[in-house]
Amino acid sequence: MNTLIKVMMLAFVLLANLPVHANTQPNILWIITDDHRPDSIQAYNRATTGESESPLGYVSSPNIDKLATQGVLFTQAFNQAPACGTSRTSMHLGQYPFRSGKYAWEHVHQEADFSQLAVSQHLKNAGYGTAIIGKTHHSIREKMDSRSTIFDLEIEFNRDFYRNGLGGLYSTGAYGLIDGVLFRRDGTETVIYPDGRKHTYTISKADRLLNAKELKIKQDVEEEFDILRAYTRINKGLILGGVNPQPADKTVDAYILKAFQNYLKNAGNSYTSSWGKKLKGADSDKPVFVNLGFHLPHTPVLPPKKFREQFKNRKYKLPEFDTDELATFTPQQMQIYNESKTDMLKEHEKLQAIQDYYAFTAFGDDLIGKAVEEFKEYSKAQNRDYLIVFTVGDHGWHLGEQGIMAKFGSWRQSLNGAVIVVSSDKDKYPAGKVVDKMAEYVDFVPTLLDAAGIDLTQQTYDYLDGQSLAQVADDNVPGRDYIVGEMNLVAGHRAFLRTKDFAFSMRTRDRRTVATAPLLNDDIRWALTAAPIKVDMALYDLRKDPLERNNVAYTVEYLELANWFRNKLGNIALGDGRVEMDWSTKNSYNISNFAEGADDKKINIPKHLIPNQALKDLQRPNW
């Protein structure tokens, strides 16, 4: 008997120390859309305002609404850097930009000593087969001088679809960026017709305006597809509205869905892709992790005719904006406005932009519904549990708020998204639950690793800045008091911190250029010691000004509070593990730790600094 007990105890110890067996790990689908406003989803609107429509008007999202009933809807989710590449790098690494060293369009690599693995690499090490399909843009390489991928399979919408004649309209772009500043370049667009014909034409020249012939060709295409361009801003090539040259099943986002479906349908086999490339399907012996990145509703905003017809006669309320608001914009905010302004569009053009945007999101809802059902069927056939995480936009999108149609700002419309998590594990993610605690996009990595059975208490994962969304959804776990982030695009380094009642942002570095050796974390306390006016502080009292129309940072009533926020955010972003890295080198970096521990997730504003509601109301009048 004693021998039997010893054998059983030994077996128990051995089993306890084995890695998580693949059969206990769920399949994971991580869906990310681009420039996607959460108010395009009826379930989100009902949860936040009690109405199905957005504050602007009609939206349609039956499939996403259904998904929300099956899991947890997080309504207060915020990204860490409101631009495509910067946000996605943060999401894939689970780190704030000021801890990963990725602030703009840099290609980060993992040869630097401080670099960490991305979520796909952790999951691969845990036994997963990994794939990214569609919009990738994570900018993470294993080696500095290679195009190494952090996924087993990578299918990129631009390289694999557009350049192989699949999709509706492809642009090389009218403008480029040098040190964050836009410059005009030779740009073309290519229309791909349903019969396969291609029509390429010039939309910009670097050294001159278009001649009469070039202009006529461009205008003919614009008339054919009812194209609305952002003609009131610096980058006049962006398409804010129009109809897709292709029917719904032949757009680039439809091909992204097909690529995902083919990857699952051909599990365990080789197959030929839509563009004629030999690929391997999912490894049927492993759990799968797929990052499915739809391009929509990113510009060009060109919904297919079938969906556009449902929205073209809808009436919408235009967002409130008055040019007098510009009087309180900081210089950095003015730079964002000047690059992105659309308040001077004609009223019917603003209406078209809103109609076509919401039509495009409705098309996305249709594709997402199909992707979810395909994934569930695949998991059922494997007899495996699943986790589905839907990130509603890698960042947000303004439809006229602050006078712009863009992202890039520290205002709510640039930063606020939503998340839906659906799991076979209903204890962690109960069906139909709505969570209004703050969530951050750095929470995705711990969420996915936790679902895979990885022990996040191990020291290996101490670098992660977020927490599993299962914890955020747990009513017994206290929520964070604020969210933070930073980016260096359009207007230079700008960090932000948001609480329930206040939104604060500031300039963090006295330069726009990307970090290069030896100027790494040099003069790092500048934003804490410079005169307040130089730091471009913006403070919005959300109790009175939820639409963020009046920056009160430099008013008598709020200046002390603004300086308190400056010290709080400055210490977090500049002195609590801040990394500045010269990404053109393998290992030139500096880490600033003069305020280690400043990021304590607590706000605790001294009460005497908060203007009393009974004081003079500083809210802007209703123009």
Image (cartoon, rainbow, N blue to C red):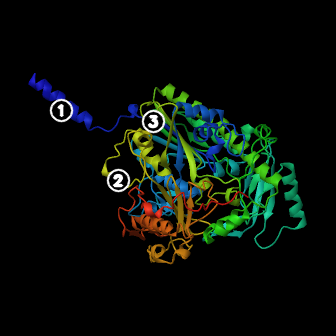
Q: Report how many numbered discs are placed on residues in the image.
A: 3
| N-term mark: 2 or 1 | 1
Image height check: is 595 above or below 131? below
Outermost residue toward the front?
A: 614
User: Is the C terminus in the top left, top right, bottom left or bottom right quadrant?
Assistant: bottom right
Residue that mark 2 sits on: 462
Amino acid on which disc 3 is placed:
Pro
Residue that mark 1 sits on: 10
Q: Secondary structure at mark 2?
A: loop
Where's residue 284, x and y in %? 48, 32
Q: Residue at x 72, y 47 (%)?
A: 357
- Inspect this view and state whether residue 127 appears: no
Q: Secondary structure at mark 3?
A: loop
| N-term mark: 3 or 1 | 1
Residue that mark 3 sits on: 287
Where's residue 339, x and y in %? 69, 65
- Inspect this view and state whether residue 155 appears: yes
Q: Nearer the viewer, mark 2 or mark 1?
A: 2
For this rendering, which residue is in front, 271 or 476? Answer: 476
Q: Residue at x 74, y 44 (%)?
A: 303
Amino acid on which disc 1 is placed:
Leu
Spatial CA span between label 2 and label 3 = 25 Å
Where's residue 126, x and y in %? 39, 42
Dividing the picture into quadrants, the one containing residue 364 is top right
Q: Residue at x 34, y 37 (%)?
A: 20
For this rendering, which residue is in front, 538 or 290? Answer: 538
- Tell me the crowding category of disc 3: few under 14, some 14 to 19, or many 20 or more residues within 10 angstroms, Cα based: many
